[in-house]
Structures are given as C-alpha cells and as structure tokens.
Image (tube, rainbow, N blue to C red):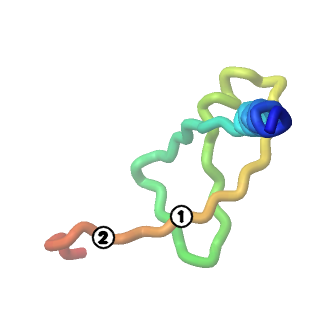
Amino acid sequence: MAALPRMLRASALALLLWAGFCSSVCVEVPSETEAVQGTDMKLLCISCMKREEVTASTVVEWFYRPQEGVKD
C-alpha cells in the first residue's frame, strides 16, 4: 500500500509537466475577413508577434453556428 501514494504523486507530477506544454493563444482577424469552408485561412497570433524569435505552427478546427433569429 505504500507504493500507491508514491504512484499517485508521480502521476500528478507527470500530469503537471504535460499540462505545462499546453498554452492558449490570442489571434487577430480583421473584421472584413471571410472564411470559406474547405479553404485555408491564416490567423495572426498576437503572442507570436510580440516574440519574433518564436516560430509556431498550429492547426485549428472551428465551427460556425449562426445566432438564432439572425438573417443573412
């Protein structure tokens, strides 16, 4: 039974280290930008712009659902 607390501590440490590699980003999209399904679109990462030495590549899957009651 003494091994269980040790294993739990090791698991918690591994989880914290793994979670440390994830971070959120801010993106900037001009208001006139139109996205077309099935085409690529470039987003500007505000964080990356502040730190020019950082190169980043991100894949984003997003979905659009119009507000109820809003007509085109």
Residue drawn at point x = 60 percent, y = 37 percent: 25
Q: Return the mark for residue 66.
A: 2
- Where on the picture, by quarter, is residue 17? top right
Q: Secondary structure at mark 1?
A: loop
Taking the image as drawn, is residue 21 in sight?
no
Amino acid type of the residue tagged 2 in the rendering: Pro
| Residue 57, above or below 23 | below
Residue 53 seen by the camera = yes
Circle on res. 8 = none
Residue positioned 24% across, 75% down in the render: 72
Q: Residues within 10 Å of mark 1 (few under 14, many from 20)?
A: few
Name the residue rendered at 47%, 63% in the picture.
Answer: 34
Whether 22 is drawn above or below 67: the answer is above
The location of residue 15, given as percent across then percent down, is 74, 38
Specify the amino acid type for callout 1. Trp
- Cα–Cα span, label 1 and label 2: 13 Å
In this rendering, the answer to whether 51 lies above or below 61 is above
What label sits on residue 62 in the rendered view? 1
Q: Is residue 65 left or right of residue 67?
A: right
Residue 45 point in image, percent of width and height: 63, 38
Image quadrant containing the N terminus: top right
Determine the image quadrant of residue 55. Answer: top right
Locate residue 27, reporting x and y percent: 55, 41
Q: In the image, residue 3 lies at what x, y percent?
A: 85, 36
- Say few, some or many: other residues with alpha carbon within 10 Å of mark 2 (under 14 / 14 to 19 / 20 or more): few
